[in-house]
């Protein structure tokens, strides 16, 4: 029988974990309420590394990408990191992400990040159908500040504050939100929880819409060696579906990486094999890493996507 021991500082994280388990389990059978939130671009996963594992990354994230997935993972930043991410959708739609993370001291780190989703330009027409000179611009963006703190050698917690904006021509809406997460690391596994996008409603003039608040509970473990890791997690959107994510990663000499994963949407009735698969690969050096992911019928866009991300490490 395995003995679990926690220091006094970890009690609050255990309580958060139990509350999240209750939250997810109590909503797991709820029917889909998709379409009742706005700023859904906040649900698009950041980084090709996580996409290659189908987003099973709450317990895996560490470094600059933790600002999105779980700010508690920021404590693994060794010095300073810059993360750049990109993918193209159909026509002119593209998502860009940039993040900077820096270690403050032995126990804490912070990050700033920005996500920008550009829908391209839309032709403007007059009342009689005549084309006008000025196109309509449509874009979403969010800016965030994150902080991670190492409570003990095994436990860390993290927080994120973010500003969200959506713009359609001259109409613009904004909101504020926050994330909270924890991560417990053992020699063979890690367990983590995350609650995100809880905040004010997005307001467009007199119309208000809720943000896509979500909760995730994840586990990653090394069944054989440090070269192979598998992760599984459950995600429940307050006004949406429940999804189970599973991903695996194998590395050779901590330099060459291959990844794969699968999403299982519990509320879907017409599932087809291969519709939620992901594949990825990565190449890592001392101060840089390049990652690529291919997702079939991506859960957010419904299209197959190619994603790329670059990570730079510097400083001492």
Image (tube, grey):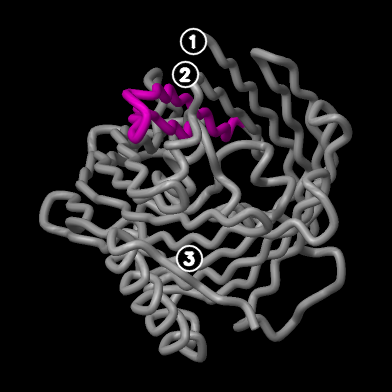
Q: Which residue is mark 3?
A: 216
Q: Position of residue 234 (x, y in %)?
A: 56, 71
Q: Is residue 111 magenta?
A: yes
Question: Which one is nearer the viewer's eye here, 18 or 206?
Answer: 18
Q: Position of residue 69 (x, y in %)?
A: 48, 48
Question: Which one is nearer the viewer's eye here, 148 or 310?
Answer: 148
Q: Find out whether the residues at labels 1 and 3 contact each other: C-beta distance under 8 Å.
A: no
> In the image, is 203 to the left or to the right of 135?
left
Measure how far apart labels 1 and 3 are at the Cα level: 33 Å
Q: Which residue is mark 1?
A: 316
Q: Position of residue 179 (x, y in %)?
A: 31, 52
Give the residue displayed 29% in from the left and 33% down from the top: 145
Residue density around tag 1, few if under 14, some if 14–19, many if 20 or more, within 10 Å:
few
Residue density around tag 3, few if under 14, some if 14–19, many if 20 or more, within 10 Å:
many
Measure how far apart labels 1 and 2 are at the Cα level: 6 Å
Q: Secondary structure at mark 2?
A: loop
Q: Main secondary structure of the magenta part?
A: strand
Identify the image quadrant of the N terminus: bottom right
Q: Find out whether the residues at labels 1 and 2 contact each other: C-beta distance under 8 Å.
A: yes
Q: Does residue 250 appear anywhere in the picture?
A: yes
Give the residue displayed 28% in from the left and 41% down from the top: 164
> In the image, is 14 to the left or to the right of 286?
left
Q: Which range of residues does the magenta coloring cover?
A: 92-119
> What's the mark number on residue 79?
2
Q: Secondary structure at mark 3?
A: strand
Eye-nearest disc, 3 or 2: 2
Where 79 sits versus 139, above or below?
Answer: above
Measure how far apart labels 3 and 2 are at the Cα level: 28 Å
Which badge, 1 or 3, comes first in the chain's sequence?
3
Q: Find out whether the residues at labels 3 and 2 contact each other: C-beta distance under 8 Å.
A: no
């Amino acid at each position: 029988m395995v003995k679990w021991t926690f220091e006094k500082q970890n009690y609050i994280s255990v309580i958060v974990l139990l509350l999240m388990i209750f939250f997810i389990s109590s909503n797991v059978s709820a029917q889909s309420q998709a379409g009742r939130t706005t700023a859904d671009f906040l649900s698009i996963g950041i980084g090709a590394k996580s996409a290659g594992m189908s987003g099973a990354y709450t317990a895996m994230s560490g470094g600059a990408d933790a600002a999105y997935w779980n700010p508690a993972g920021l404590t693994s930043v060794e010095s300073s990191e810059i993360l750049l991410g990109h993918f193209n959708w159909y026509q002119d739609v593209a998502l860009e992400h940039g993040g900077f993370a820096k270690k403050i001291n032995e126990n804490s780190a912070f990050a700033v990040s920005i996500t920008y989703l550009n829908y391209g330009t839309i032709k403007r027409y007059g009342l009689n159908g005549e084309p006008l000179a000025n196109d309509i611009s449509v874009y979403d963006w969010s800016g965030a500040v994150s902080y991670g703190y190492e409570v003990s050698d095994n436990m860390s917690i993290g927080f994120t504050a973010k500003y969200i904006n959506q713009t359609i021509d001259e109409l613009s809406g904004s909101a504020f939100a926050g994330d909270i997460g924890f991560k417990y690391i053992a020699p063979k596994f890690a367990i983590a929880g995350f609650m995100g996008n809880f905040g004010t409603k997005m307001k467009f003039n007199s119309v208000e819409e809720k943000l896509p608040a979500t909760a995730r509970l994840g586990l990653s473990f090394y069944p054989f060696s440090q070269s192979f890791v598998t992760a599984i997690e459950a995600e429940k959107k307050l006004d949406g579906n429940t999804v189970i994510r599973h991903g695996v990663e194998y590395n050779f000499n901590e330099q060459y990486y291959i990844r794969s994963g699968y999403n299982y949407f519990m509320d879907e009735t017409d599932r087809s094999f291969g519709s939620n698969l992901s594949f990825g690969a990565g190449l890592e050096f001392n101060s840089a890493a390049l990652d690529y992911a291919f997702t079939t019928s991506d859960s957010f866009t419904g299209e197959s996507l190619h994603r790329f991300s670059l990570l730079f490490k510097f400083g001492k």
